[in-house]
Amino acid sequence: MQRSPTRLASHAGSWYSQVPHTLAEQLNSWLGTAAKTVERAKALICPHAGYSYSGPTAAWAYKHLNPEGTRRVVLLGPSHHFYLDGCALPFAASYQTPLGEIPIDQAAVSALRQFRLYQDLASDTEEEEHSLEMQLPYIRHAYAGKDISLVPVLVGQLQPRQEEAYARSLLPLFEDAQTVFVISSDFCVTAR
């Protein structure tokens, strides 16, 4: 399958700032007010609404990422724009953010494809979905200057038997000490 070089930041300029220094200042401000409760998190659950709604809340999760020793982020987010029976893997080879691109971990994606559980996203479907994109600026910012890669997984409707099969496929990545998981969620709470 021919891979598109880059998934564009299609929601930049509407759901969050497309201006790099403005976006970085917002993220720094929200992270500066968030408290850290553990030294290092293995997995985060973060909201994916527009940053005016979810940005401050997401900071409370991203405050717990430790960029040292991490080389990969597995990002899971729900499908909003089309019905998906199961999970899907990226079409693109990298994801764009106003703060820089994040390359897709092609080896990890290929290993997941070997399970024959995952569908492949079409490029237009991949760019329409916001649940994955809304995490990308925070991820790129948290790992600024670091060589990290991304394994994006779009999650659809799952039956219990499917949940177990997908969990088994993701377990080797979860057990890897240099991998963190970010789960993009529809929840949003204002932190004051």
Image: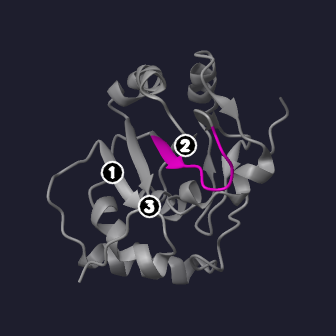
Figure check: 43 above or below 158:
below
The residue indicated by pointer 2 is 150
Distance in Å between CA atoms under marks 3 and 2 = 21 Å
Residue flagged by tag 1: what amino acid is it? Leu
Give the percent coordinates (x, y) of residue 18: 64, 77
The residue indicated by pointer 3 is 186
Q: Secondary structure at mark 2?
A: strand
Figure check: 169 above or below 36:
above
Q: Is residue 7 visible?
A: no
The residues colored magenta run 73-84
* Label 2, residues with CA under 10 Å away: few <14, some 14-19, many ≥20: many
Residue flagged by tag 3: what amino acid is it? Asp
Residue flagged by tag 2: what amino acid is it? Leu
Give the percent coordinates (x, y) of residue 53: 43, 79
Give the percent coordinates (x, y) of residue 174: 36, 30
The residue indicated by pointer 1 is 44
Q: Quadrant of residue 80?
A: bottom right
Task: Point out the tag, 1 or 2, that comes first from the N-terminus.
Answer: 1
Name the side, left or right, on which 22 lies relative to 91.
left
Q: Residue at x 83, y 29 (%)?
A: 1
Distance in Å between CA atoms under marks 1 and 2 = 15 Å
Q: Nearer the viewer, mark 1 or mark 3?
A: 3
Task: Point out the tag, 1 or 3, that comes first from the N-terminus.
Answer: 1
Task: Point out the tag, 3 or 2, that comes first from the N-terminus.
Answer: 2
